[in-house]
Image (spheres, helix red, strand yellow):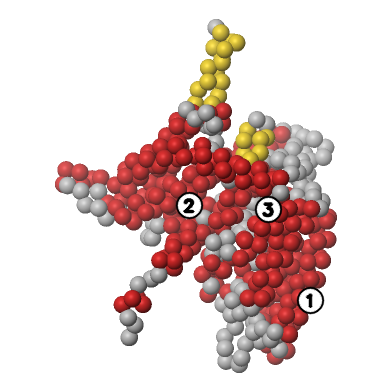
Amino acid sequence: MSSPAAAVPRRGSRALAVLQRIGRSLMLPIAVLPAAGLLLRLGQPDVLGENKDAWISFSGSDRIAEVFAAAGGALFDWLPLLFAVGVAVGFAKKADGSTALAAVVGYLVFHYVSMNMFFHSEELRPRVVKALFDPDNPGTPNEVLDLGAGNPTQVLGGIAIGITAALLYQRYYRIKLPTWLAFFGGRRFVPIITAFAATVLGLLFGWIWPLLGGWLTDFGQWMERNSTLGAAVYGVVNRLLLPLGLHHIPNNVVWFQIPECTIGGKTYTGDLNCYLNGADGAGWSMAGYFPVLMFALPAAALAIWHAAPRHRRAAVGGIMFSAALTAFVTGITEPIEFAFIFVAPVLFIAHALLTGVAMALADVFGMKLGFSFSAGAIDMLINGGKDNTHNLAGLIVMGLIYAVVYYFLFSLLIRVMNIPTPGREPEGVESVAADPSASPEVAASAAPSPAQAESRSSDG
């Protein structure tokens, strides 16, 4: 019989469980990115336009391209709101429509309150103002708050509101009010209390963001100055966090929060945002994933199949070949990675380090390519022709080299260390790859992420 102390979860495990819930909840809003990225891509002149170099060109296509660009831009402009709703629904237990409504109400209140605070901040005022000219005095513009400008907190503000709405929903969705206020009880109370909580959060962020945002900006500038080292560290950390389901957290910081870029006078935050909107030099945090997710991990799957005893190869091959094709086409790689992560830590560590090396090499050789879903063939086909994509051929060559390295490295280590990868388990033991969805992380990966959403990898 277990002792009472043993029944009490450790503080660290409880914190880890919360972080994992946050990581999983981030996958829901990320699932919107493929649609946003495709719409934005269709709105770019090299795809749809009246110029002779466009993929699709006919009379009036410029106007149609503007519509697609506006549609994709709307999703990226309001990404923080999408994260607020997605995180609220994903984080709350037994969420319903009132959870989503509370998140919308909360983010709108948060946006207006925090923007008002930023208007009076010396550091952030230039990002939230617009100049209105008086016809009677055209030389003296009047600066007013531009509520249509992007909130400097970006997706972090949306995530904070989403978690707040989810927690308030769980706390108050069954609340009983006095008879004369009974109409506002239960789920109807959740958006109301969320509005007040969002007001407080808006004031808090308005006070601390000039300092916190400055730190993030400085870190983003450091990443740009030391992009090779930064990409390598990010790649290693991303893969190391995969078994814990926490890799989406650094993904969202790098892809949507830092660094910043300015295109046509408009500021965008995050490498993915900057790349898809056409910033030259963006894509450093994504390019290195393509050789690993598209080429190397499918080769690792081949090595796992080849290392299995002959009488088990048919069963293992059905799983591994399907997983390899999925990885190559879409960039979803967890079914392959979870086949060796827990049974072979040495393979996992080698994989994490080689991912970091791939990220660094891609930066050294000027390879720039991004994705809206993950580092798979679909995104390579869609984004390979963008003006800010560079050295695509080199990226493919590196992918082929990585495939050879992974195949021989995995084959060698599996045999020399007698690693029980799928098919090599003792007779009577079910393969870890028999049901990839058995892993919470793999099951969760059925919803798209960019590096997987990435990774969906990420989604790398």
| Residue 121, percent from left and from top | 49, 30
Q: Is residue 71 visible?
A: no
Indicate the amino acid at tag 3: Gly
Mark 1, residue position: 408
Q: Callout 2: 10 Å neighbours few (<14), some, many (20+)?
A: many
At horizontal 71% and vertical 45% (from top left) the residue drawn is 225
| Residue 267, percent from left and from top | 62, 35
Q: Is residue 121 visible?
A: yes
Q: Residue furthest left?
A: 179
Mark 2, residue position: 86
| Rendering quarter of residue 281 | top right
At horizontal 79% and vertical 50% (from top left) the residue drawn is 366
| Residue 124, percent from left and from top | 54, 32
At horizontal 70% and vertical 74% (from top left) the residue drawn is 301
Q: As drawn, is 43 to the left or to the right of 129?
A: right
At horizontal 20% and vertical 48% (from top left) the residue drawn is 177
From the image, which quarter does the C terminus lie in?
bottom right
Residue 230 — which label? Answer: 3
